[in-house]
Image (cartoon, grey):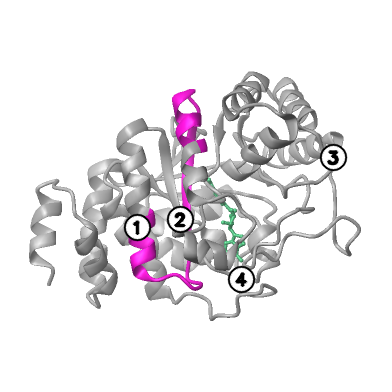
Amino acid sequence: MFAEIKRKIRNAERINKDEALELFNTDEIHELGELADEVSRSFNSNRVYFIVNRHINPTNICVNRCKFCAFSRSKGEEGAYELSIDDIIAQIKEAHNTIGYISEVHIVSGLHPEWQFEYYLEMISKIKREFPSIGIKAFTAVEIDYFAKKSGLTIEQTLMKLKEAGLDIMPGGGAEIFNPEVRNRICPEKISGKRWLEIIRTAHRLGIKTNATMLYGHVETFEDRVDHLMKLRELQDETGGFLAFIPLSYQPENTDIKVPYPSGIDDLKTIAVSRIVLDNIPHIKAYWIMLGEKLAQLALLYGADCLEGTVIEEKIAHSAGARSKKGNTIEELIHLIREAGKIPVERDSFYNVVRLW
Ligand code: V47
């Protein structure tokens, strides 16, 4: 099957849209996985990365109501919460004390109608001051756009201020699916895909590395997924600023898009096709929170080379019915990686090696 595509990949030739679509439509899942694993090995040998990190969501109060989101609340609504900077510092300290150290915090929030940009700057600079060795991965392109609008600054100025305050890299959230028709159905109030790409382009130009995501398994088609991947590949050709790509498997509970969870086959296919198409992005994450630990482990043989991390407390996917644990220990991550026949590599935010296990 797909002999010509195989030949191209083995000769390090780029595959086109039609070929990517053919891969999504194939039933030859093992062959697809084998091919993606070959590509993964060409990037990262037999290594699989993880990080000792904590996810922090300072607030779930959000002015947008994305149809796939079960996390957001309006101000005053039951379940709405706001963390102070002291609360955030306390969460990091607790993680630090429990594990002994933390290499990264991952911070994303709702679009809070009242918080000012200065609050976020203070948040980042206080974290950096208190924990200078911790990498700060914070704020999606959607939040950056919102901060810029609220503060009257340009995107460039907003990003520069955050960088000066201590922001190291940006997560890949908010990309969802770029196709405007699908985007309009699933998150009509969110910035466009074009705007998301522009903001990320600016971040890369300013030397801020980012990740990229794709939310799949709701109402999009394989064509939409391919289009999304191609747009990321094009931007990466231009900037080289993406560190990792993370396909996000749709979690449907408590949301307005009532569809079944993506199947395991769909999850593995999406990881594999992403690895093959994104021939210029060094890392593909199997986000165990959304895939579940066991399927994420299998994804390590289907093109993924990173498991994200310890996470400690996950809220976004678990509000929508994620069936995984909310956090994991270093030992469990290492066990998953070793049992897949791979070498566990503990990393920092920039994929520098912290420790080979
Ligand atoms: O932007 C929201 C998605 C994202 C649902 O960059 C949902 O390293 C599935 O982006 N089902 C946040 N997904 C998570 C994210 C992320 C996670 C881990 C690592 C990194 C990284 C980024 O979650 C949101 C949105 O696209 N999301 N609701 C849902 N029901």
Say what amino acid the circle numbered 4 marks: Arg
Few, some or many residues within 10 Å of mark 4 (<14, 14–19, 20+): some
- Sequence-first tag of 4 and 3: 3
- The quarter of the picture where residue 304 lies is bottom left
Tell me: 354 left or right of 97.
Answer: left
Establish if 269 lies above or below 346: below
| Label 4 – label 3 distance at C-alpha | 27 Å
Label at residue 87? 3
Q: Secondary structure at mark 1?
A: helix
| Label 3 – label 1 distance at C-alpha | 41 Å
| Label 4 – label 2 distance at C-alpha | 27 Å
- Sequence-first tag of 3 and 1: 3
Say what amino acid the circle numbered 3 marks: Asp
- Sequence-first tag of 4 and 1: 1
Q: Secondary structure at mark 3?
A: helix
Report x, y in % for residue 278: 30, 49
Q: Give the magenta part as a residue range.
A: 199-228
Circle 1 sits on which residue? 227
Few, some or many residues within 10 Å of mark 3 (<14, 14–19, 20+): few
Circle 4 sits on which residue? 323
